C-alpha cells in the first residue's frame, strides 16, 4: 500500500482526452464505491489531496478520483486554443465527469477549486450527488487580496515565468505570498516540486495558468452565490479555523445559503487542510459520504477514452 503522504506516481495516473486537451488523474479505491472527485486550486495539482484521497480509498470508503487540473501545476498542457476562462474550466470539470460516466459524484474543492466547485454545482449539477467545500474562495474574495497580483500580472507577457523563478528555491516557497500562509507546516519537497517543475519548464503550462488567472473575477463567485440555494443535495463545509485568507464568516454564510448544509471546523490547519490536518478531513468526509445522500451506482467499466500513462 502506498504511503498516504506519497505523491501520485506516473504509473498511478490515467489519462482522459477531453475537447480542451488531455487531463491526467489518479483513480484509487473500489470501482463500485461512491465516487469522489477532487478539485485543487490554481498553481497547485492533485498531489495536494494525496493525504486525504489515499486513506479514503484504502478504507474502501470511496473511489477517489484526483485529477491534475490545468491550473498551473499540471504536466500536460491543454490544446493551444482551449478555453480556460473560469466558465471554460467549469465546463472542463463537467466534461471530465461525463467522459468517465461518473454519477452521484461527491465533488470536493479547496482554495480556488472550491470556487470552481460552486460554479459546477450551480451550472452543471446533474452528475453531482454531494458537495464538499473546504476553505475556499467565495463571494467577493476571489482571489484573496494578497494573491491578486497574480490576476493583474497574468496579463503581462513573461510574468508567469518571472514569478515562477521564485519557486526554484524551496525555502522561498514558504514565503507568505507563495505557499507559506496556505499550509501551516512545510509541504513535502516532492509535492511542491511537482508544481514548480511544470511552471518552470513548460511554456504550455504557463500559458494555461495565465489564461485561468487572467479571467478570475468576483463576478463569478457573486453570481454563483445567488444560486447556491438551488443546489438541494447534501453539502459539507469543512473549514479551517486558522485560515489566513478565507474567513469563518464565509463558511457560515455558505452554510446558510445551501438548502442542506453541514458546517464543520478543522483545527490546526491553514487553507490546505488536506496537508495540515488530513486525519480530521478524512474523518469528516468519511462520515459525510457514508451517512448522507444517494448511493453511487456500481459500474466498474473503464471510462471511454481512458488509458494509463507512464
Image (cartoon, helix red, strand yellow):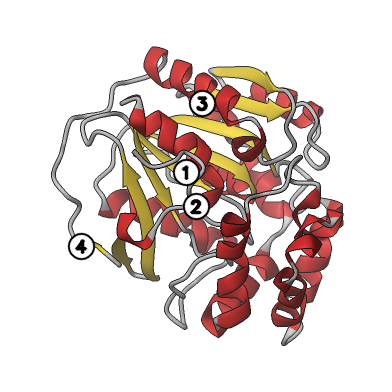
Q: Mark 4 near mark 1, Cβ–Cβ under 8 Å?
A: no
Tag 1 secondary structure: strand
> Label 3: how many residues lie within 10 Å, few (<14), some (14-19) or many (20+)?
many
Quarter of the N terminus within the rendering: top left
Q: CA distance from mark 2 to mark 3?
A: 16 Å
Q: Using the image, determine if residue 216 lies above or below residue 247.
A: below
Give the residue number, with chain letter if any, for mark 4. 305
Q: Position of residue 290 (x, y in %)?
A: 38, 16
Q: Residue furthest left?
A: 301
> Label 2: how many residues lie within 10 Å, few (<14), some (14-19) or many (20+)?
many
Q: Mark 1 near mark 3, Cβ–Cβ under 8 Å?
A: no
Q: Which is more foreground, mark 4 or mark 2? A: 2
Q: Which badge, 4 or 1, is on the more N-terminal residue?
A: 1
Give the residue number, with chain letter if any, for mark 1. 38
Q: Which is more foreground, mark 1 or mark 2? A: 2
Q: Residue furthest top?
A: 291
Q: Which mark is residue 46?
A: 2
Residue at image location 55% in from the left, 41% down from the top? 109
Q: Which mark is residue 282?
A: 3
Q: Mark 1 near mark 2, Cβ–Cβ under 8 Å?
A: yes
Q: CA distance from mark 1 to mark 3?
A: 13 Å
Quadrant of res 149: bottom right
Q: Which badge, 1 or 3, is on the more N-terminal residue?
A: 1
Q: CA distance from mark 3 to mark 4?
A: 30 Å
Q: CA distance from mark 4 to mark 1?
A: 20 Å
Q: Using the image, determine if residue 282 lies above or below residue 90.
A: above
Residue at image location 45% in from the left, 24% down from the top? 233
Is there any visible trace of residue 211 in the rendered image?
A: no
Q: Position of residue 259 (x, y in %)?
A: 55, 20
Residue at image location 54% in from the left, 76% down from the top? 205
Q: Which badge, 3 or 4, is on the more N-terminal residue?
A: 3
Amino acid at each position: 500500500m502506498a504511503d498516504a503522504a506519497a505523491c501520485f506516481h506516473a504509473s498511478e495516473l490515467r489519462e482522459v482526452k477531453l475537447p480542451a486537451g488531455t487531463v491526467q488523474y489518479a483513480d484509487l479505491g473500489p470501482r463500485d464505491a461512491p465516487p469522489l472527485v477532487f478539485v485543487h486550486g490554481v498553481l497547485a495539482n492533485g498531489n495536494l489531496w494525496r493525504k486525504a484521497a489515499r486513506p479514503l480509498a484504502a478504507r474502501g470508503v470511496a473511489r477517489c478520483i484526483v485529477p491534475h487540473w490545468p491550473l498551473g501545476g499540471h504536466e500536460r498542457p491543454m490544446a493551444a486554443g482551449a478555453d480556460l476562462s473560469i466558465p471554460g474550466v467549469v465546463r472542463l470539470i463537467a466534461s471530465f465527469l461525463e467522459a468517465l460516466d461518473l454519477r452521484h459524484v461527491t465533488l470536493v474543492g479547496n482554495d480556488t477549486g472550491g470556487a470552481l466547485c460552486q460554479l459546477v454545482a450551480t451550472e452543471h449539477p446533474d452528475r453531482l450527488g454531494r458537495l464538499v467545500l473546504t476553505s475556499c474562495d467565495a463571494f467577493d474574495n476571489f482571489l484573496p487580496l494578497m494573491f491578486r497580483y497574480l490576476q493583474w500580472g497574468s496579463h503581462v507577457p513573461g510574468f508567469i515565468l518571472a514569478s515562477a523563478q521564485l519557486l526554484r528555491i524551496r525555502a522561498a516557497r514558504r514565503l507568505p505570498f507563495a505557499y507559506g500562509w496556505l499550509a501551516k507546516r512545510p509541504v513535502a519537497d516532492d509535492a511542491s516540486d511537482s508544481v514548480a517543475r511544470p511552471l518552470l519548464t513548460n511554456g504550455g503550462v504557463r500559458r494555461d495558468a495565465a489564461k485561468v488567472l487572467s479571467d478570475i473575477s468576483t463576478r463569478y463567485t457573486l453570481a454563483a452565490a445567488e444560486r447556491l440555494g438551488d443546489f438541494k443535495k447534501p453539502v459539507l463545509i469543512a473549514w479551517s479555523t486558522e485560515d489566513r485568507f478565507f474567513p469563518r464568516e464565509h463558511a457560515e454564510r455558505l452554510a446558510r445559503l445551501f438548502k442542506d448544509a453541514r458546517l464543520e471546523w478543522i483545527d490546526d490547519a491553514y487553507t490546505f487542510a488536506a496537508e495540515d490536518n488530513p486525519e480530521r478531513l478524512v474523518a469528516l468526509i468519511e462520515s459525510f459520504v457514508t451517512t448522507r445522500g444517494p448511493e453511487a451506482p456500481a459500474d466498474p467499466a473503464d471510462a471511454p477514452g481512458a488509458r494509463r500513462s507512464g
